[in-house]
Image: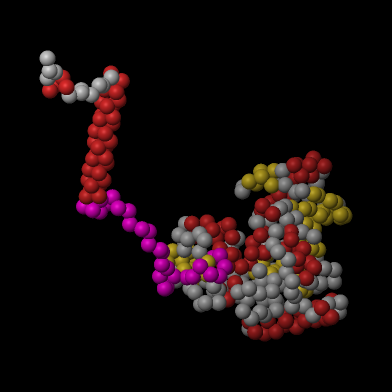
Amino acid sequence: MKPSQKQTQRQPHFSKDSAKKRDFSAKNDRRSVSRTARIETANTKKSAVNSDNKFLAKPKAKPVVRASNQPKAEGEKLQKVLARAGQGSRREIETMIAAGRVSVEGKIATLGDRIDVHSGVKVRIDGQIINLSHAQKEICRVLMYYKPEGELCTRSDPKGRATVFDRLPRLTGSRWIAVGRLDINTSGLLLFTTDGELANRLMHPSREVEREYSVRVFGQVDDAMLARLRKGVQLEDGPANFKEIKFTGGVGINQWYDVTLMEGRNREVRRLWESQGIQVSRLIRIRYGNIKLMKGLPRGGWEEMDLENVNYLRELVGLPAETETKLDVKQASRRPKSGQIRKAVKRYSEMNKRYKK
């Protein structure tokens, strides 16, 4: 019997393993096609949404352009300039700036602003324009002045009374700034400088610069009282004490003491003694830091300090050393005699009296 056509055709032989491989391959192909289709569809939808939705595309940040009327980022820090102009310490001025009290060219200043003091920029504090000519970089100068009793520590007095600034040498383009104050009935050493930052640092209580006074007291002083004054007593504006108290002489109930303070609150020496029932009849400041009142300097006389002493004060409060001086180095040893200074003081006093009449 002839085999049929179906029988004569050789049927391909598939094993179970090859069938499983074929089915697995087909599934993988379908999955790959499906995955590719999904990715393409998602990309198409994403591009379509991005093209329609403007908020999804973040615009590139534009560079900040300063307005032409704003100060350039060149020059010195604003607080440094104002401190040199005698408007306060850097920290105090930073507080003013943060409070919005300082403006530059009519716009409220911010911390970090810089200005060029030579550009004619207008700076105001609380609406009042500040003279920046005093803040221009110049040589730091310091004067020692022997303040007499009866002079006020102010630039001008409405009643026409004498002030400590009346006798000082005239300056061009800068001004003298008093380092602290002495009340009208106190005499002695008073420092003046052209550097506002130096003045403010020397006056700040955190620097703890020693001030020594020679004081004549009226009353019975005992050891217990001196111990209380050294330890500290409570005044109206807080606790206070003398760092050192040294007896220097006297007769009866009029006695002289040298006392040292680490700060300069208003009438602090007098109030400390008064807290113990003792009256101060005479008060003279004789030392500020290591700067002593010069012997032979008459009341109302002044002496400009040399570079060594200027840099001592600057180092004391953490300022860089000054490298220049207005003093003639060759004539530094030729100090004017006390008699010459007294004659100059007397001549000035007579001229001042005639002028006020």
Magenta highlight range: 50-78
**Which residue occupies 32% across, 53% down?**
58
- Taking the image as shown, residue 132 lies to the left or right of residue 208, namely left
Q: Is residue 32 above or below residue 316?
A: above
Q: Is residue 40 above or below residue 137?
A: above
Q: At which x and y percent is residue 61?
A: 37, 59
- Between residue 267 and residue 176, name the one nearer to us: 176
- Taking the image as shown, residue 256 lies to the left or right of residue 17, namely right
Quarter location, residue 161: bottom right
Query: Farthest residue toward the front?
Result: 1
Q: Which quarter of the rendering shows the N terminus?
A: top left
- Taking the image as shown, residue 184 lies to the left or right of residue 37, namely right
- Between residue 40 and residue 167, name the one nearer to us: 40
Q: Evaluate whether residue 50 shows in this view.
A: yes
Quarter location, residue 317: bottom right
Q: At which x and y percent is residue 280?
A: 74, 55
**Which residue occupies 76% across, 66% down?**
311
- Between residue 6 and residue 335, name the one nearer to us: 6
**Which residue occupies 70% across, 84% down?**
351
Q: Evaluate whether residue 336 shows in this view.
A: no
Q: Is residue 18 magenta?
A: no
